[in-house]
């Protein structure tokens, strides 16, 4: 059992949680992930580690309440316990040896982009962070990202923060204006990563993307997280989660990621009942 | 007078048309009367050929003699002197190629049903034993075991009986390894596996789940941390794929994933959140026990047509005869001498079919089995909405890639001295599928037991 030390709402759909897991906190590096399971009946869900505090022995995760498992997780509060919390899984991002890096986060992807930017910035690398959100109410980690970047570009799809456009618009403009990036790290929805990669390929800039596909064990055992990279089958859990974005078959990945969508719907409805039942019980 | 019936006492089974729709255990097990009846078929031969066929050397005639007397607890003691997981072995050991293949009664007629008797004794103990085993006196030495599958549990159990303080590290949320995630409920009920593990805990074995060793801690850190020896039993957990077109389509599973969703994650039970595709028509590629498990599980999930696609003939199939027999009884279609070529899919990326090609057997290959050769122009398509790839697993690299000094061969199997299970790294031993590549539960248990003996000698000799 793993104790929830802190729970903060970042926006209406996203929550930050610090979980007591000292051994993981000691070992985790940027780019690695954990798998959680809320209770005996729950799924195993991978989430990239957003931050760690070795002294407190805590691991921070940021999740979007999209599936039944994250909704269930969100019913827990500070002081409650998560049944299973495993990590650190996957290979750490290789951040050594770059001069100027653009770190791009889309929506919830910023939760993962942030620790990468932080690690690079602390190594003395020049860092531009480009973060995109649907609207201004959904913006998360603004101060944190600002603190670990030379320039922060905040974009919204609807322009409600006064800066309308996609992350690719900002990236393209920076490249045109002579930002001499030797690496781009893109983390967010698959269509966003695909668009970034198309752009950087034209400009010949190496691009790393972080994958978050469906998986069970996270140790290479099930092969459910496989994707095609450079024509070869790779497992996101052990070969990744980072891959060369110019080699990833994004179209296949997008199809695989919606594999269980109709079933998730059913599970979500089931869960809603579960949550309602819980509330009914506590009110009684 | 021994019972001279040439046939084994039949074991009650669920009828095939009933069991293909449920996950309950197929074989129901002997009653006391049946067990005694079968036990009296044993001639108690002097030279005990059966014992030589058992990878963990259970003193088979001795335990059977106790069954004849009706002293099942004594029979249990005889078995557990050699085996840590009797209820498991009685169910999943390939007795027909081991102990039972050496039985004198097998020369004219059927051998003694040793597996069935072992199962009876283990189940009897589980259901009737009142007192817990006494914890052995601690000897003050600590050993770490990585992986809680058959080899790890056996190694842990053997060492615990000698007084070692053993800690078992498991990556999953439940201990048991392949016994939990791989072998289906209808062959090996999970409650039985957990009871066996409870028995090990009663001996003082400490089991720590959610610990992915090599990530959260390295072997070197375990050794620095005061563990005097480490046993690596991490299994063969990396599924092989065919490398054919369409393997990324929705509806293509590794047998590992399909079985894990069902067995460990209980996707067949409504109260669990685990999603799984419930296909109508399924092709399972492969001819081993795992392929049979996947095919029979697919039936139980509600599939109408399940095909085994295997490139050689039935004679070369690595699966146990009993499993092939059960699968056929339940209505699995065997497409022998057929090899998949590519998986076909629709625009949304879902599987619509499996293109196969007919094969014929040519000259024997390195394995001694006749090599299958494709018949040109014989391609055909099976209409399926799911394809399960069950063509074997490679050893998991997490430990070997994070442990300097631990040598592995070209296939990724950890190199050991076969007499002692000692690896190339001081104080580190290994066994089971991590060493041999995918093999059987009992072979892994044999290796775990051997490693425990070597570890004991190593630590006592320090």
Image (tube, coloured by chain):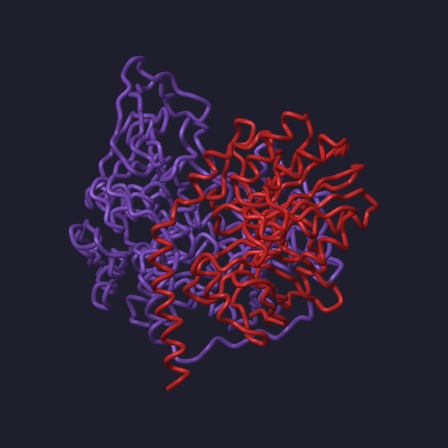
Left or right of B132? Residue B169 is: right
Residue A168 vs residue A97, the one in the foreground: A168
Residue occupying the far top of the picture:
B376
Residue A135 vs residue B131, the one in the foreground: A135
Q: Residue at x 26, y 36 (%)?
A: B307
Left or right of B79? Residue A54 is: right
Q: Is residue B231 visible?
A: no
Residue occupying the far front of the picture:
A162
Q: Position of residue B130 (x, y in %)?
A: 39, 80
Q: Position of residue B78 (x, y in %)?
A: 42, 65
- Quarter of image, res A142: bottom right
Give the tally of numbered discs. 0
Question: Is A121 drawn above or below residue B35 in the view shown?
Answer: above
Left or right of A250? Residue A259 is: left
Q: Residue at x 56, y 65 (%)?
A: B207
Q: Residue at x 37, y 58 (%)?
A: B266
Residue B152 vs residue B244, the one in the foreground: B244
Residue B108 vs residue A200, the one in the foreground: A200
Q: Position of residue B26 (x, y in %)?
A: 25, 55
Specify the chain shown as purple.
Answer: B
Question: Is A165 drawn above or below residue A80 in the view shown?
Answer: above
Specify the chain shown as red.
Answer: A
Question: Is B460 drawn above or below residue B70 in the view shown?
Answer: above
Left or right of B321? Residue B98 is: right
Placement of the C terminus of chain B among the 4 image quadrants: bottom right
Q: Is residue B358 visible?
A: yes
- Quarter of image, res B124: bottom left
């Amino acid at each position: 059992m793993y104790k929830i030390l802190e729970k903060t709402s970042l926006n209406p759909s996203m929550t930050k949680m610090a979980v007591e897991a000292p051994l993981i906190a000691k070992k985790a590096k940027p780019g690695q992930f954990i798998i959680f399971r809320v209770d005996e009946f729950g799924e195993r869900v991978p989430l990239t580690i957003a931050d760690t505090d070795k002294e407190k022995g805590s691991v921070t995760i940021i999740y979007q309440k999209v599936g039944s498992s994250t909704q269930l997780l969100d019913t827990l509060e500070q002081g409650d316990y998560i049944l299973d919390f495993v990590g650190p899984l996957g290979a750490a991002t290789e951040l050594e040896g770059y001069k100027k890096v653009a770190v791009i986060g889309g929506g919830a992807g910023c939760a993962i982009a942030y620790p990468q930017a932080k690690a690079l910035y602390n190594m003395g690398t020049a860092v531009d962070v480009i973060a995109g959100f649907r609207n201004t109410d959904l913006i998360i980690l603004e101060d944190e990202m600002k603190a670990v970047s030379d320039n922060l570009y905040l974009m919204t799809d609807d322009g409600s923060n006064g800066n309308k456009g996609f992350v690719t618009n900002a990236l393209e403009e920076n490249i045109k204006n002579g930002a001499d990036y030797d690496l781009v790290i893109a983390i967010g929805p698959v269509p966003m990563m695909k668009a970034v990669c198309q752009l950087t390929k034209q400009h010949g800039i190496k691009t790393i993307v972080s994958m978050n596909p469906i998986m069970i064990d996270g140790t290479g055992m099930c092969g459910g997280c496989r994707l095609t990279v450079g024509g070869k089958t790779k497992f996101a859990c052990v070969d990744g989660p980072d891959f060369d974005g110019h080699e990833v078959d994004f179209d296949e990945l997008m199809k695989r990621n919606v594999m269980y969508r109709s079933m998730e719907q059913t599970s979500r409805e089931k869960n809603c009942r579960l949550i309602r039942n819980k509330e009914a019980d506590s009110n009684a | 007078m021994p019972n001279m019936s040439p046939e084994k006492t039949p074991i009650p089974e669920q009828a095939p048309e009933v069991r293909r729709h449920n996950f309950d255990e197929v074989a129901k097990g002997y009653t006391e009367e049946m067990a005694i009846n079968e036990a009296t078929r044993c001639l108690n031969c002097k030279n005990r050929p059966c014992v030589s066929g058992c990878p963990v050397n259970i003193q088979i005639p001795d335990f059977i003699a106790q069954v004849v007397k009706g002293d099942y607890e004594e029979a249990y003691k005889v078995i557990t002197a050699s085996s840590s997981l009797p209820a498991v072995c009685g169910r999943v050991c390939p007795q027909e190629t081991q102990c039972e293949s050496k039985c004198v009664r097998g020369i004219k007629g059927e051998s003694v049903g040793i597996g069935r008797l072992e199962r009876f004794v283990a189940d009897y103990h589980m259901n009737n034993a009142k007192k817990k085993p006494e914890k052995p006196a601690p000897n003050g030495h600590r050993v770490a075991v990585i992986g809680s599958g058959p080899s790890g549990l056996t190694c842990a159990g053997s060492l615990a009986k000698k007084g070692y303080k053993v800690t078992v590290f498991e990556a999953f949320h439940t201990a048991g390894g392949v016994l939990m995630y791989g072998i289906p409920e209808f062959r090996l009920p999970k409650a039985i596996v957990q009871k066996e593990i409870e028995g090990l805990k009663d001996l003082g074995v400490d089991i720590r789940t959610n610990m992915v060793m090599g990530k959260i801690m390295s072997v070197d850190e375990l050794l620095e941390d005061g563990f005097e020896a480490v046993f690596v039993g991490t299994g063969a957990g990396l599924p092989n794929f065919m490398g054919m077109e369409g393997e990324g389509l929705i509806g293509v599973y590794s047998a590992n994933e399909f079985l894990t969703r069902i067995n460990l994650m209980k996707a067949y039970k409504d109260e669990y959140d685990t999603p799984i595709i419930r296909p109508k028509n399924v092709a399972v590629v492969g001819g081993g026990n795992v392929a049979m498990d996947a095919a029979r599980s697919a039936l139980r999930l509600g599939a109408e047509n399940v095909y085994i696609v295997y490139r050689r003939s039935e004679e070369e199939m690595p699966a146990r005869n009993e499993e092939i027999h059960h699968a056929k009884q339940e209505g699995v279609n065997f497409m022998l001498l057929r090899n998949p070529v590519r998986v076909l899919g629709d625009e949304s990326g879902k599987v619509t079919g499996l293109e196969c090609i007919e094969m014929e057997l040519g000259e024997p290959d390195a394995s001694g089995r006749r090599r299958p050769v494709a018949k040109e122009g014989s391609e055909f398509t099976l209409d399926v909405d799911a394809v399960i790839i069950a063509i074997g697993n490679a050893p998991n690299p997490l430990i070997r890639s994070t442990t300097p000094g631990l040598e592995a061969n070209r296939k990724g199997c950890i190199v050991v001295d076969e007499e002692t299970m000692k690896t190339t790294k001081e104080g580190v031993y290994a066994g089971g599928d991590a060493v041999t590549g995918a093999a059987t539960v009992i072979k892994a248990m044999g290796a775990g037991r051997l490693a425990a003996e070597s570890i004991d000698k190593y630590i006592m000799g320090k």
